[in-house]
Structures are given as C-alpha cells and as structure tokens.
Image: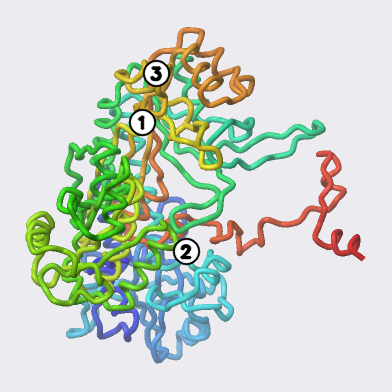
Amino acid sequence: MYFPSWLSQLYRGLSRPIRRTTQPIWGSLYRSLLQSSQRRIPEFSSFVVRTNTCGELRSSHLGQEVTLCGWIQYRRQNTFLVLRDFDGLVQVIIPQDESAASVKKILCDAPVESVVQVSGTVISRPAGQENPKMPTGEIEIKVKTAELLNACKKLPFEIKDFVKKTEALRLQYRYLDLRSFQMQYNLRLRSQMVMKMREYLCNLHGFVDIETPTLFKRTPGGAKEFLVPSREPGKFYSLPQSPQQFKQLLMVGGLDRYFQVARCYRDEGSRPDRQPEFTQIDIEMSFVDQTGIQSLIEGLLQYSWPNDKDPVVVPFPTMTFAEALATYGTDKPDTRFGMKIIDISDVFRNTEIGFLQDALSKPHGTVKAICIPEGAKYLKRKDIESIRKFAADHFNQEILPVFLNTNRNWNSPVANFIMESQRLELIRLMETQEEDMVLLTAGEHNKACSLLGKLRLECADLLETRGVVLRDPTLFSFLWVVDFPLFLPKEENPRELESAHHPFTAPHPSDIHLLYTEPKKARSQHYDLVLNGNEIGGGSIRIHNAELQRYILATLLKEDVKMLSHLLQALDYGAPPHGGIALGLDRLICLVTGSPSIRDVIAFPKSFRGHDLMSNTPDSVPPEELKPYHIQVSRPTDFKVSAH
C-alpha cells in the first residue's frame, strides 16, 4: 500500500510525544479535499454546541473564547492533552492552579478516547514550542471549563494507524476502527468524489437520479443472486446483481439519461476486491454509441478526481480484447510496466526441442515468452521451481527459464538445444539486457497467453518485494478494453453458449450476420474500463430490438424467455437505441486511496466469508418467525439427531 508523505509524517508524529514534535493533522487534508469543490468551505459548527472544530484554529483566532468537543487523543504528564475531532488535532493546556482543580481532575482522570467538551481561550504556544508542520501548531487552548461527555472503557486496540491489528478485530469493533485517520480519509474522499460525480451528471449533463427496486425477480445467467422469501408459498424475491433491466426500462420510458448510486448484491464468496453487497455508479443513456459513453466516463472521472492526486489525462487509450490477451495475457492489463508477451513461434520453426515441436505442429500452437528484467539477479532457484509448479498445476503447461545473456541456464536443460542464431534472434525480439531472464512456454494461443499473463504479475510482485520498482504507486493508468466476444462456450458444456457480458449486450454492427451462422465468432459492443490492472467499470450498447433479443435468449442461450417477458414486451413498444455502464465505486475508491482491500473504503463491510463480525450476521431465526414464509430449516443438529 502506498502511504503519501503526509500520512507517513502522521504515523511518525503520533508515535512520539506531541508537545515538542511536528506532525500534520487530519484537518489540512480534509480541507484540501473540499477545495476541489467550487462551493465555499462548509460551516462545520452550525447547529451544534461547539464554536469551532479542533483542526481550524490558527494564530488569527488568538484571544477568542472557544468551545471544542472531541476525543482525548493523547495526554502527557497531566500538563496538556491533544483533543481530536474529524477535522484535526489541537493542544489543550490542563490548568494547574487550585482554583481549577475540578477542571484538572476531569481532564486528568478521563481515559484516552473519552469524549470531552472544553471551553477556554486561544493563546500562543511558548516560544520554541511551536509545531510548524501542524496546522494548529502555533496555538493552544487555555481551558476554563471542561465536561466529561462520555468516558471510554479499556479499548481492544489502540486507535492509531501505525498499530497493527487483524482485520477480524477491526471489523468486530468497526465503530472504533472508523476513528482512525486512514478510515476517516477514505470515507470522506469517497463522499467528495460521489458528490462531484452527482454534480457532473445532474448539473452539467442533465442526468436524472432514479432509485430502482432491490426486491426483484430471479434473472437468467450472470452471478448467483440472493433469494428473499415472500408470504406467498414457494415464491421468492431476488436481490438484483445490478439494476440492468430497470435502467433499460427507464430508457423505454423516455427518461433519456439515468444514473444511480446503486446497491448491488451477489451471492458469491468475498475477495479483496469483491463482497456480497457493493455499490455501483450506474449510468444509462438513450441515442448514444460506444464513443459517447467513453467520453462521458472520462469527463466524469476527470471532474471528480481528488485534488491531492495528479490530474486525470483524457482520452484514455483503447485496446481490443484480442490485443490485451495477446500482449498481457488478460482482459484487464496493468499497463504501468512492460514485460509484454512476445510471440517467438517463428524462431523455433526448426527446433529440436520436443515440446516446442509438438506445440507448433498443432493448428493453434504457438511459442510465447516474457522478459523478466534483472530476473537472473533477483529471482532465486526456489522462485523458478514455484513458477514451474504453478504452470504445471494450474495450466498443465511447461515453463522454461532461459538466460540469453549469461551462462546460468540452471533448471533449463533444453537451453543447450537453442542454436546460436536462435539465441541472437531472441535477444533482438525480447530486447534482453545482461541480467534479464526469459520465461518461455508453448501451447494453444489463449492458454499460453493466460499463463504468461499470470506469471507476469507474479514476477512483478516478487521483484518488488526485493526492491525493484516496476509499478509507480502514484500513477493511475486507465485503459478501455473493447471488442469482446459476444459469447463464450460454457465450461460445463463447451457445445453450449453463455454471454461473455450479459444477454442484453448488442452485437458489433459488422458481426450481426454471424449470429445466424457462426455465433462464437461474433464480437460485442461491450467495453470495460481498466485501472492499474483492475476492472473498475463495464458496460455495453444494448439490444433494443425485441426480435433480436428473443432470438439470442431463446435460440442461442437457450434461456426461458418467460422470465424476461416484461423486458421483451417493453422493447416491442418503441424502445430507443441505448447503452450504459456501471463503475464499481468500492473498487475505484480502493485504488484511488491505495488501500489493500475494498473493505477499507466501505463503512461497514462484510468479512472475507461474507459475515458482519460486529453484529454476528447472518443469524438464525426462530421457527415461529419462519412460518409466515412457509419455510422450514434443516439445521446441522437435526441431521445429527436423525443419524442416531
């Protein structure tokens, strides 16, 4: 994870006594987020008992009587404490004279992280004790009155970003974890970006923000959906995995430009970049083509991008699906670094190496390679063994490490069969340097590319753990991937087809005739937006012709069209051409903030197993509460009893 300089300074500052050290605080960064807005800075102390926030006081406030509320961040020798709120930190002097004994007792007895209210005068810090890197570092508060609003019990962990805690503990006590600087920053930045997106879409481009139902019906294809019981026997709602059908129906209804910050649900296992419930910026437009959608999204991201990051440069580059797979081995390539896949089939047309001969003798057989910069220097023998085992276990492929410029061809006995002319040609094609290593494989094109695409990322991770900088953490590399296949063969039955995106995706205009002859070859009008090797958005131009939609569903995908009769009927009633996209908000904010997981940019996320550890959700329900839904549950204990 990348930590900006201000965050590193904060970590260092909070680990030392505060009175004589320098440290930045929350407020300066939070206010920098607000500067991106064209509106004036909001009034944070309206409607509440405080007069000011902890982070806003400066030497210009000297002599003012103020009331502050916040948490006790730190206390030293019962002489001063640091008070914290969402906006920053301020130093508070604990009075030592007898007349203020009651105030001293409140401030000295209150445990750290207790909530207090203090009133007093803004004064200058003593000469030589100013903190130039702290926005409030020139002043402190001379307290006159104090009130303990709520004492804090012993904490399960210290609320400091540099104190390591397990994710399970953080999720169990999420309300405490939310007090950390990083979580405050992540969620406030998320809020600012969403607000700017709303401004861009509604105020500048006439979009309408429309909520769609979260209780819907089961739909064919796509991700697995959560079922919700109804009071009608045997009938269930389904939580939608996206508002796809609704936004198309809104276009039929003449709304023309729709968007929504949409809650979506998938009954799938969690990963660092996925969880059961997530949020999309969902968008649909009428009378638009692919170029129009792409321009809209580029402008949206450029407008909403945080001020403390380098500006977004548009237009984003575009790459076809076939090119992405051939060059990077994936449809979501990380283009921040090289190590591209090179086809070296022609070099080995007359080779004596057996498995290369076998591969090239087959119709779609190829020989592919990637160059690992300084691989001979940084990758160890055990790394090569691990790479070869991965290739064998997951792809049933063989990987050869070849050192073209050195004599270190250990673990690669076939390297002796590479002729000098072939070696020189490989050096030219791969552009290898002295310490580089080449990973070579052979087989069917897609399979060979996919394997090298995985190894490209694995090797990049290995090199970076050993100090080689390949991916600039401050760089945001956007890419459009287009011209996806419209259909893919089903894994369980390759003779049958499934949608590569979803069944409402329109075919490429040049490939419509292939639907009736060779549907596997048809391209789609589907486009993905990729950022630093992560898919952050996907969309398509939709099918607006009912007859074509019915043919694809019934004939090609063999789906039950009755489940989509409402949509097919709507398309028959004058549906305009339309298209859209959905941006994964959680994943986007995760990448912008440099967080290791989307759970770090969601206020109350689920755990890796999809559980809420704070409230112990999901939970069991008594049988009497299930009766109205005509449901009986067989619990594990029931099976044990019956077994005996």
Quadrant of the frame with the C terminus: bottom right
Q: Is residue 64 left or right of residue 561?
A: left
Q: Quadrant of the N terminus?
A: bottom left
Instruction: Say which residue appears at 31% left-offset and 61% top-offset.
Output: 455
- Tell me where residue 114 appears, x and y as whole percent: 51, 75
* Secondary structure found at label 2: loop
Q: Camera-side residue: 592 or 137?
A: 592
Q: Residue visible at 16% across and 64% down?
A: 418
Asked where in the image residue 289 lies, by quadrant, the reply is: top left
Image location of residue 360, percent across then percent down: 27, 48
- Give 174 or 442, whichever is nearer the viewer: 442
Mark 2 → mark 1, Cα distance in angstroms = 38 Å
Which residue position is annotated with label 3? 256
- The residue to which callout 2 is attached is 178
* Mark 3–mark 1 distance (CA, rounded to whole Å): 20 Å
The kind of secondary structure element at disc 3 is loop
Instruction: Please report the residue visible at 52 percent of the width from the left and 85 percent of the height from the top.
Output: 109
Residue identifier under label 1: 526
* Name of the residue lying farthest toward the top: 573
Element at label 1: strand
Q: Amino acid at mark 3?
A: Asp
